[in-house]
Image (cartoon, rainbow, N blue to C red):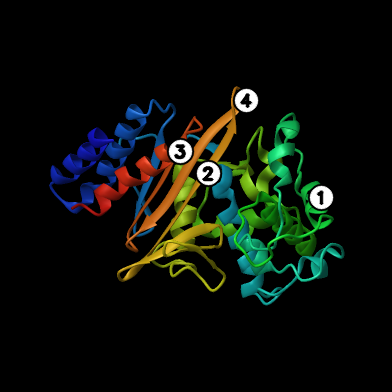
Amino acid sequence: MIRYLLAALQALTASAALSDTPQALADAARAWAEDYDVPGLAIAVTERGVVQPTDADSTRRVDMASLSKAITAVCAGTLIDEGMWSARTTSAAVLGFGHEGITVADLITHSAGLMPDSTQRLTPLWMTSAAPRKRIVTEVALNRARDGAGRYQYNNENYAILGEMIETALATPYEDACRLRALDPAGVRDARAAPVMGGMLPWGGWAMSPADYARFHAHWFGPKGRYASGGAISIDVGGGARYGMGMFFRSVQDHVNHWHFGAWCLPGRVEAGSYAVQWQNRWGAVVTYDACVEWDAMRALDAALVAVVYPQ
């Protein structure tokens, strides 16, 4: 850990100007991958919403895993902005079945009281095709007793329901609707359902390059983004952080930082990781890798990048 933190700091110190920060971030990510023996590293860096050049791969299309949730949340947010929905619109009102009182805000913030997460058990059974699975997950979740409503409990089912609601409300396939509403405005060029995990599209099935996800993330959560300040729909998750619109966020001095990790961990079948972050209303990074890593490695990746953006 000390080695790649030093590499990050040295890369930044050696920079002739702050414009070298993108390469310093790429170098820090590469040092982290070497330290943890993580294959398939790719990284895209943005400055004020624009993807910056580095010597790292940023164009290979990869699984975004749980970073897909922000796409679904932003897509749902456009329906709120247009007045079709409100944060209090319920799944029962849109779908015509299930528990009364589960709102769009509950689903976005993982506070609908839906547990356990059926997708953890069912996902290995669904890897033979990319057929959409959101409907069956929605039916399973909404026909089960609720537990812990109003409390943050991270669960893929919340975003499966949101995806089903979007598709029902717009009478348009989720993928088409959310590409048009969430990705096209950000200039995303080549996003699609992942070849194996695409059936889980609303909560984990989008695939695109790190550069494309960086465009999406900067457009909506960056310095001029609709959700740069976090947005009105969020929930306290402790430690000064909140969760909303498919992202964690925290106020830091005069700005708000946004971040989220993604992971598919099915050894021998799909192993993929992703990390998206926005700092200081200026810098952003999206890192992907072909591995399922432990939480300590995820925290170490974050620390390596933070050391570049917030040098001591």
* Residue at 39 percent of width and 40 percent of height: 43
Task: Give the mark nearer the N terminus: 2 vs 1.
Answer: 1
Residue 312 lies left or right of residue 305; in this view the side is left
The residue beneath circle 2 is 262
| Structural crowding at the residue carrying mark 3, measured as other residues with C-alpha within 10 Å and reported as few (<14), some (14–19) or many (≥20) | many
Task: Give the mark nearer the N terminus: 3 vs 4.
Answer: 4
Q: Nearer the viewer, residue 157 or 208?
A: 157
The residue beneath circle 3 is 288
Task: Give the mark nearer the N terminus: 1 vs 4.
Answer: 1
Residue 116: x, y in percent? Answer: 71, 49
Q: Is residue 61 above or below residue 82?
A: above
Q: Marks 3 and 2: which is nearer the front?
A: 2
Amino acid at pointer 2: Gly
Task: Give the mark nearer the N terminus: 3 vs 2.
Answer: 2
Amino acid at pointer 1: Val
CB contact under 8 Å: marks 1 and 4: no
Marker disc for residue 269: 4
Image quadrant holding the N terminus, namely top left
Q: Nearer the viewer, residue 103 or 114?
A: 114
Q: How far separated are the C-alphas under marks 1 and 4? A: 25 Å
Residue 221 lies left or right of residue 305; in this view the side is right
